[in-house]
Amino acid sequence: MKHTRIRTFNTKETYPEQNLDNDLCQAVVAGDTIYLRGQVGQNLDTSQSVGIADVGAQAEQAMANIARLLGEAGGELDDIVKITIYLTDPRYREPVYRTVGKWLKGVFPVSTGIVVSALARPEWLVEIDCIAVKGATNS
């Protein structure tokens, strides 16, 4: 089975301030399964950070990115089966989970929440990744 890689990039361009050279992508489609890279408060088209110091705005951007990438991969939010939410401060849980809950109302994925000391850039406060299965149905 051939995997489809969506929005490929190299970390040299994405993180010019860091000495990296990794070939990555935003999403991989393997059969009916879609794996998304962790999404943050960053515009997918411009790579500009949004919602600086506003965890709710960053979560909103991350979820908008997830919806967009799933669409590009042939899926939709209803196909999400697993999300992982990384927070840099446990006090961010309520605003982030409220935002995620709004986007995933009625989807019922499994979820893991983790508090970490930092993300790839100091301005990022939340990162959300997910796994989806095309055609998944709620029951």
Image (cartoon, rainbow, N blue to C red):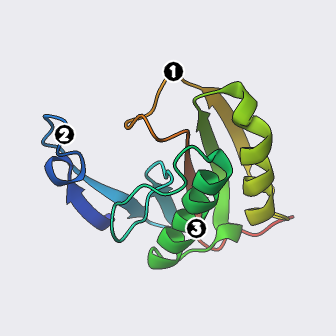
User: Label 1 is placed on what type of residue?
Assistant: Ser
Q: Which corner quadrant holds the C terminus?
A: bottom right
Q: Which mark is residue 17?
A: 2
Residue 18 position within the rendered picture, expressed as x and y whole percent measured from the top left: 19, 36
Q: Nearer the viewer, residue 90 or 10?
A: 90
The N terminus: image quadrant: bottom left
Which residue is painted at 68% across and 33% down in the image?
113
Pick whichever of labels 1 and 2 is earlier in the sequence: 2
**Measured from the top left, where is residue 52 in percent x and y?**
51, 48
Indicate which disc, 1 or 3, sits on the residue closer to the N terminus: 3
Q: Is residue 56 visible?
A: yes
- Asked whether 49 or 44 is in front, the reply is 49
Q: CA distance from mark 1 to mark 2?
A: 20 Å
Instruction: Give the alpha-carbon distance from disc 1 to disc 3, as whole Å.
Output: 24 Å
Name the residue that disc number 3 marks.
64
Looking at the image, which residue is at 51% across and 21% down?
A: 117
Contact (CB < 8 A) between labels 1 and 2? Answer: no
How far apart are the two marked residues, 2 and 3, measured between alpha carbons? 26 Å
Q: Is residue 47 above or below residue 58?
A: below
Say which residue label 1 marks: 117
The amino acid on which the numbered mark 3 sits, given as a three-letter code, is: Ala
